Image (cartoon, grey):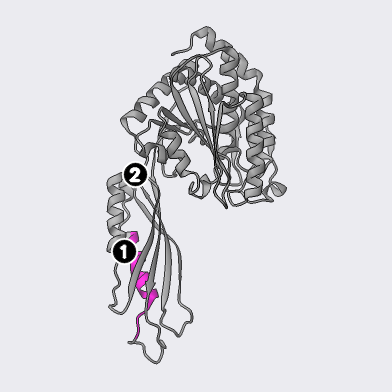
């Protein structure tokens, strides 16, 4: 349902009136450190989020929680449509960040003009604040919206290992999926690369390198050949990168190395390329008959291809943005998100509907405060469209 000009004007006024509250909420939220590897801090952050949602969007009708030792809890909250829509959307939000405890001491949340900087403001705490206020505006004005199934997870930055079952379960309930990750220079993300993390080990035979230069087998020599082979199989034009980022091996300069290890990051844009890379790793063998090679690891996130259903969702969102007076661009990006899991299940996925800014995972991470207002309006209007 497209909002009427009168409804759009009322929505804009209501969102603008919340600007200071949104800024205050984000300052408070970003001042709570939530590193992926600190369960205690994640618990504090999650408690704040649920309290914020309760006072902003109202109490959830249902709450489902998954607890996995060593990870932040995964919580799903249901906010049924107050206007009777039978449609549902799933909103994916992670509350962990890459920033370690103590980062705020040297890099506090700061506002200069239209910009706010601080750990996690862009990736992705602003998106969650915008979502909470969009729900509040929609319901306060009686605008149509679908039911919103909100999933909060605390381990996205380390691969969503504990939360993946919950993500897939909630997405499997049906409906479009909105990922409140940060935008890419203002654009939403309709395709993301699949990500693989592989470990390659070479095992040789140790001997004295000076006394027996032709004996034994060098694992370092094997690994050097394997690195060149792997890098040679990258196809950047096809969107496939293969990066051996860590190499370790050997014990002494005068010993032919008995063991070497490499960690490999792989990014692909299509399922066909993922299959080719799998065959590549399965085919790795040692050059020396005395040596051997082992490969472990696999795909951390499947490819998020721009499916017809995602394309159709983007077109609807672009029309909503046009009605609000701005152009909504779409891009494909190399990073992965929880949207990859949703797309693999066949859902229509619109990623990057969160903060507008830049510098994800960098110490100049920032968001636009005007962008917070614009994106909150956009999400409110998109809810009406999806109702």
* Quarter of the figure that contains the C terminus: top left
x, y percent for residue 105: 72, 48
Binning the other alpha carbons within 10 Å of mark 2 as few (below 14), some (14 to 19) or many (20 upward) gives: many
The answer for how far apart the CA atoms under marks 2 and 1 are is: 21 Å
Does the magenta stretch mainly form a helix, a strand or a loop?
helix
Q: Which residues are magenta?
A: 216-231
| Towards the viewer: 239 or 11 | 11
User: Which residue is labeled 2 in the image?
Assistant: 269
319 over 359 or under it: above or below? above
* Quarter of the figure that contains the N terminus: top left
x, y percent for residue 370: 60, 26
Residue at 61% from the left image edge and 14% from the top image edge: 13
User: Which residue is labeled 1 in the image?
Assistant: 229
| Residue 250 visible (yes or no) | yes
Q: Is residue 112 magenta?
A: no
Residue at 42% from the left image edge and 79% from the top image edge: 257
């Amino acid at each position: 349902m497209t909002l009427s000009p009168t409804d759009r004007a009322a929505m804009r006024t209501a969102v603008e009136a919340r600007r200071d509250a949104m800024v205050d909420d984000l300052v408070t939220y970003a001042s709570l450190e939530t590193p992926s590897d600190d369960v205690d801090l994640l618990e504090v952050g999650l408690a704040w989020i649920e309290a914020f949602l309760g006072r902003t969007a109202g109490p959830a009708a249902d709450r489902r929680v998954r607890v996995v030792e060593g990870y932040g809890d995964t919580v799903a909250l249901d906010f049924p449509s107050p206007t009777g829509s039978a449609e549902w959307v799933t909103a994916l939000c992670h509350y962990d960040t890459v920033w370690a405890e103590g980062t705020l001491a040297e890099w506090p949340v700061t506002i200069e003009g239209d910009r706010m900087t601080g750990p996690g403001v862009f990736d992705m705490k602003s998106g969650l604040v915008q979502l909470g206020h969009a729900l509040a505006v929609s319901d306060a004005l009686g605008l149509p919206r679908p039911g919103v199934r909100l999933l909060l997870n605390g381990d996205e930055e380390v691969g969503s290992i504990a939360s993946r079952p919950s993500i897939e379960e909630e997405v499997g309930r049906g409906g479009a999926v909105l990922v409140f990750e940060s935008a890419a220079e203002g654009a939403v993300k309709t395709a993301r690369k699949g990500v693989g993390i592989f470990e390659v080990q070479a095992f040789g035979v140790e001997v004295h390198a000076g006394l027996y230069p032709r004996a034994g087998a060098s694992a370092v020599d094997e690994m050097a050949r394997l690195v060149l082979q792997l890098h040679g199989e990258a196809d950047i034009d096809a969107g496939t990168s293969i990066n051996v980022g860590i190499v370790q091996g050997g014990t002494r300069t005068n010993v032919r190395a008995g063991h070497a290890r490499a960690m490999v990051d792989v990014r692909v844009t299509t399922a066909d390329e993922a299959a080719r890379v799998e065959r590549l790793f399965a085919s790795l063998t040692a050059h020396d008959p005395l040596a051997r090679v082992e490969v472990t690891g696999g795909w951390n996130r499947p490819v998020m291809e721009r499916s017809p259903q995602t394309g159709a969702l983007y077109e609807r969102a672009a029309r909503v943005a046009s009605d609000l007076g701005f152009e909504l661009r779409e891009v494909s990006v190399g990073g992965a998100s929880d949207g990859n899991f949703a797309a693999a299940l066949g859902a229509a996925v619109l990623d990057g509907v969160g903060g507008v800014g830049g510098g994800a995972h960098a110490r100049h991470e920032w968001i636009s405060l005007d962008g917070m207002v614009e994106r909150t309006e956009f999400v409110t209007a998109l809810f009406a469209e999806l109702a």
